[in-house]
Amino acid sequence: MMSLLYWICETYLAAKRKRGKRKSINQYWRDFKTLYRRVNGAYVDANDSNEVVKYINRTLKVKFDLDTTSKPKPVAGPDDLLLLLVQH
């Protein structure tokens, strides 16, 4: 499981020479767990899952310089909310 994630980082992130997002690697992990459950009819062991998450957050994050920041979300204040309610 960890080898697959390492291969994805090495093939797609390192080849593009751009900073990847940890969120995208977590999505690959979630997709793999879903595929595993569908094929085998059983869930991935919880301890194995925790070890993979630790591997992503420690080893892959450091080696491939994964970005952990999220996109800034727009925030509406009370004045903006009042304007939206009045106009619509």
Image (cartoon, rainbow, N blue to C red):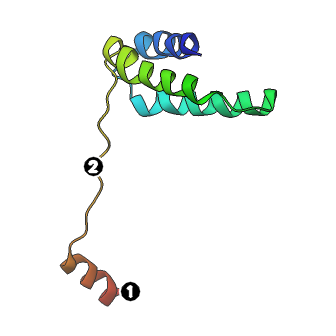
Q: Which residue is mark 2?
A: 72
Please name the amino acid that badge 2 sits on: Pro
Q: Residues within 10 Å of mark 1 (few under 14, many from 20)?
A: few
Q: Position of residue 12 (x, y in %)?
A: 49, 16
Looking at the image, the residue that sits furthest to the bottom is 86
The N terminus appears in which quarter of the rendering? Answer: top right
- The residue that disc 1 covers is 88
Q: Amino acid at mark 1?
A: His
Rendered image quadrant of residue 67: top left
Residue at the (72%, 30%) spot, across then down? 35
Residue at 29 percent across and 37 percent down: it is 69
Q: Which part of the image, by quadrant, shows the C terminus?
A: bottom left
Image position of 22 (left or right of 43): left
Q: Residue at x 31, y 44 (%)?
A: 71
Number of the front mark, 2 or 1: 2
Q: Is residue 86 above or below residue 59?
A: below
